[in-house]
Image: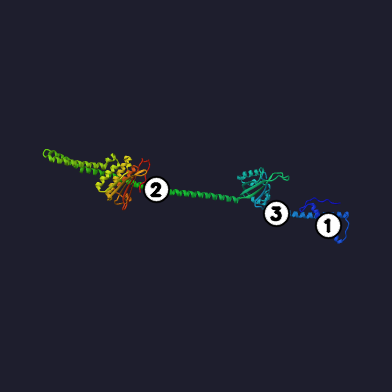
Amino acid sequence: MKLPARKTKSASGTPIQLRHRAEATVRTQERKQRAKTAKAKSATDPERMLHELQVHQVELEMQNTELQEARDRMELLLEKFTGLYDFAPVGYLSLDEQGQIFEVNLSGAALLRVGRARLINRRLPAFVIPASRGIFLAFLKRVFTGHGKQVCEVTLEREDGTTFWADIHGTAAAISANSPRKWCRVVVSDITVLKRAEEAQRRAEAIEAANEELRQEIARRKVSEEALRKSERRQRQMWEQSRVLQEQLRRLSHQVLHAQEEERKRISRELHDVIAQTLTGINIRLAALKKESALNRKGFDRSITRAQKLVEKSLARVHDFARELRPAVLDDLGLIPALHSFVKNFSHRTGIRVHLKAFAGVEQLDNNKRTTLYRVAQEALTNVAHHAKASRVEVSIQKLPDHICIKLEDDGKSFSVDRFLRANGGKRLGLLGMRERLEMVGGRFGIESAAGKGTTVIAHVPLGKIRGGRRWSPLK
């Protein structure tokens, strides 16, 4: 009776392949047996049955050998897997929906510092600190209700009270017939070092940001300090200028009062010594004429002539006084005729040649500006006569884009302008007076003096009206 072939699938081939291999092995053994006996026998039914049994025996032996090899391989793989699972650098845990642990590797137990046997059936949320427990429970809910891998970072507390930052990845496991309850696989990693590094990085960045702000603040304070120092220097300069100007103003006031008093004395002396004496002489002459008129007719005519000359001399002197105080021609005819008249009398009195060149449009200026230009020219020429020892003076009035410029150049002695202005005494009253007059009409005043080139007085007067708050920079 023929035995049915086994349908079991081995690790090295199908049952048919095993049978073929068994039959080949039996045929080899039979050929060897026939070679020994050298006798061929006819096949009988018992022999065929024996043949089948031998084939089946060889097949079972081969299957047994292959199963033993497969078991050895499986045990080796299981040992490797167990080593990889237990000694992985992360903790592997299997949890249910309540977070109860029913499987954990050695690394997971080592992270929590609890024996593996003691961890089984304990709830992982019990190891989560209260501040992070809500985050972990929300993570566990997402794992069982969501799709794919979920991640969270929480702080876990070991049984010995120490804590560590944990990075947890979770994935829901498929439900099988052998395990109907829901469960998930969780991977726990200790990221305390990473968190400390991140915290250190944040602190370093915060310190760097604070240092940068500090550097910027230092830079701003340096700028502010420099601006403050500049402001203080400027304030000191302005204070010094103010003090100098106040001192100049006080001296100028004193000099003005002194000049007024001197001018009054001079006018009083002139009136007493010249006009009064002349008028007294006229009065005496008229009294004598009254007595002589009846006695000597010819002497009477000569006396009348001498009296007329005294009157003319007195009138001329009075006119000189009036011209020095305020020339009528300036108001009646204008600036240019007034300057011509003054220059003519100045040359006649001093012997200094003066050449006047004027811009006719200067007469369009208002009365104050024309008076200022006249006084500047008058004072400058007076200074030339008193101090410069010059032989020639050039006076020019010209129009510039937005102002009128009057320039007086002499060929006399030079002097240090700055030292002269800083010097004490009344000699600089004329210069200060000229500057004050020009500033009153919004003008500028300057003096240049160089050895061998004489002295140049320059005055600028604006053409238009003085704008509110406008200050002209002084001429160099």
Label 1, on which residue? 27
Question: Which residue is nearer to you in this view: 401 or 243?
Answer: 401
Going from N to C along the chain, the mark reached first, 2 or 1, is 1
> Where residue 318 appears, x then y in whole percent?
23, 41
Question: Where in the figure is residue 392, as x and y percent of width and height?
Answer: 28, 49
Label 1 CA crowd tier, 10 Å (few <14, some 14–19, many 20+): some
**Mark 2 crowdedness (10 Å alpha carbons): few <14, some 14-19, many ≥20:** few
Left or right, 463 with respect to 319, comes to right
Residue 159 visible: no
Q: What amino acid type is highlighted by mark number 1?
A: Arg
> Separation of disc 2 and disc 1 at Cα?
124 Å
Q: Position of residue 87 (x, y in %)?
A: 67, 53
Q: Which residue is mark 2?
A: 234
Marks 1 and 3, how far apart at CA: 42 Å
Question: As rendered, which of 49 and 214 lies closer to the eye?
Answer: 49
Secondary element at image label 2 = helix
